[in-house]
Every structure is written in structure tokens, then in C-alpha cells.
Amino acid sequence: MRNEGSHLSDDSHRSVLMTSIKPLLMITGFLGAGKTTLLRNLLVQLHQREILADVILNDFTNADIDVATLDGATLASVAPLAAGCACCDSLEELVLLCKAAASGKGDLLLIELNGTADPLALLETFTLLEKRLPLFPRWQVCVIDARRWEEEDALTLLKRRQLETSGFWYLSHGDQLQPEALERIRGSISRFSEHAVASSVDELIGLLQHEINGRQDPSWTPKPIQSTSSLKTAKSSQTHRDPVHALSHRFTGCQFALPESVGLQPMKALIKALPSWVLRAKALVRLHDKPGCRWLFEKVGKESLISPIPSQELLKTPASLMCIGAQLNPDELQQLVTSHLRG
């Protein structure tokens, strides 16, 4: 695609980008699949190899909650993006964040999309704006929860869109299944998306490290490693009329203020008491008997996290509970918060 306002030839433009072009890895997957856990693992292992990433973390109401779980020492920068559908609600803001990351100190850019996002429109945007966003190669990995892959529901098409636009897939929670079930699931995923490649954390790290180290070679030239065939398998015309994309707009998020410090057992009871129509919940609070940091409590569907996760300090982020679902009842949720944490 030629930029009519540019006075550079394609070759000259390419040589300019060579000095600043960075690889991009976009992490997708449904609510609670383990995207942020994968992101944390990637950041730690990249840091051990003296590679730092800029991070854009997209979530519904308050992306700062997940930002608090990242170790700032393992990354170059992190920017929260609060949006249900980044391609519709906050596309301009996302593009500006990507442009800032492209000229930042990081060696690459990692983007984690929220669990109900449709990646297709974003991939199209990156392609249309590739001369303004020097991010290449552009990879996408879909995190798939092994426990839920075989479930069929009204959102199955959206979950599969997240896979069919990916070049790689990463299976989480596989340790909770028997080997024969795990093998069946792997086969099912491979048959559904033949172009996508199964990957481990080590394999993703190796891919990124190889690309970044290769740029130190004077003869290096950027090459499109990920096939664009994934875009051809998905319906890419008129995204906003796409019924699969419309599924991503069924979800809403709401946030509730919490006491700055709470008891461990009342907090666990609150998370457990959340109704089934809350598909994802995250709470960031201090605990009475564990001073020194904040703690992240989570729930995915009917399952709550066994133990809270210690989080980094975010002084501007108040103690809060965030809930995501297709049919939220804020009044009922507020009553639950009040009844469990009133004292």
C-alpha cells in the first residue's frame, strides 16, 4: 500500500524503518485462559536474556489491575488500555500507544488483548498502517484453556476467531487433564486451525530472541515470518456487520470500590459468591494480615483462584473489584460487596 503523502521511495522508506522497526507479539484468548500468566512468563524469560519489551495491556474497565501484577523490572514500559473492544472503542488510542512503543526503549512490543476481543480488525489496522507503525514481523499467539476448549456455547465462534487469526497457539491448564484427553484436544485444535503452530513458552522466547538478535547482523532484512493466510480464513469484510465480531460487543464491565484493606476470608467468600453470569472478576486490595503489598483475587466462570497473587504498588489505582459479563446486574453485585466487606 502506497502512502500518497510520502516523498520517500519504497526502498528509502524501508531503509528508514530498518533503524527502528520492532517485532510485535499480540496475545489473544478468551476470558481467564491465562493470557496475563503467559505475558508474565515471557517478560521474565526475556529479561533473563537481557531483552526488554514494551507492553500494552488491554482490559475492560481497569487495565491497571493486571498492570499491577507485572514486575516493572522485567519490562521497558507498560501502558494500560481500558476498552471492551479495542478496535471500536479505543482504536485511535491503541495506535498512539503502538507508535510510542515503536520509538521507545524496548526491543519489542507485547500486546495483551482483553478476553472478548476480536483480533481480526486490529490485524487489518496494523496492515493498513504498517508504514506508520514500524512493527514487524507481527505475530499472534492464542492462549487456549484446555479445560474449556471442548465446551460449546453461544460464544464458541468468537473463541475460534481468536484462534483462526493466530499463527501460534499455546495450551494452558493442560496439567489438569489426563494425557489421552489432552492429546484429543491438541488434535482438535490442530484440525480446526491447520495453519497455526502449537508453541510453548520456550519456543515463543526462541522465536523472539532469534528475531531480535538477528537485527544485530548488518545483512538483516525484515521478513514476513507469519503467513497472512489466517486473515483469508476469517471474514474480513465490513467488520462491524460481522456477526462474530458482534459477539465481542455483548459484554460489559463494571467496577466497585472496595475498602483499602480487607480480611482474607471475607474477600475469598465474596469472590466465591459472585453469580455465574460474572464470567470474569478481578479484585485488587490490601489484606489485614499481609501488609506490604496489594493482592489480586480472580474468578473465571465458577472457578476462583486458589490463592491471591501479590501485586506491585500502584498508588493511583484504588482498591476495587472489576466484573465482566454479558448480563451484569450492578445493583446485585454492589449488595454482595457490601454484605461481605461491610466490616
Image (cartoon, rainbow, N blue to C red):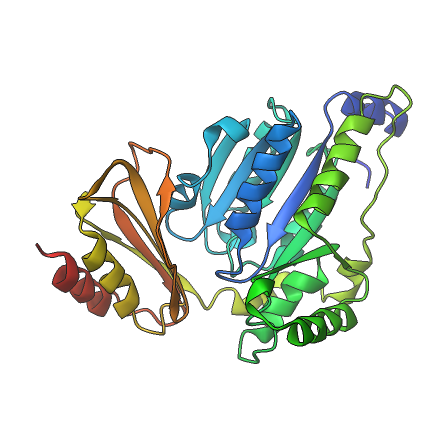
The residue lying toward the viewer, choosing from 93 and 68, is 68
Q: Residue at x 58, y 63 (%)?
A: 175
Count of marks, rendered view: 0
Quadrant including the N terminus? top right
The residue lying toward the viewer, choosing from 20 and 278, is 278
* Residue 205: % across, % down: 70, 40
Q: Is residue 32 visible?
A: yes
From the viewer's perspective, is residue 120 above or below residue 14?
below
Q: Residue at x 49, y 27 (%)?
A: 73
From the viewer's perspective, is residue 343 above or below residue 73?
below
Q: Residue at x 51, y 54 (%)?
A: 114
Tell me where residue 159 sits by quadrant. bottom right
View extreme (front): residue: 179
The residue lying toward the viewer, choosing from 125 and 193, is 193
Taking 62 as reference, is 221 left or right? right
* Residue 137: % across, % down: 77, 39
Quadrant including the C terminus? bottom left
Tell me where residue 179 sits by quadrant. bottom right
View extreme (left): residue: 343
The residue lying toward the viewer, choosing from 196 and 91, is 196
Taking 158 as reference, is 304 left or right? left
Q: Residue at x 53, y 30 (%)?
A: 74
Q: Is residue 137 visible?
A: no
* Residue 70: % across, % down: 46, 38
* Residue 150: % across, % down: 61, 77
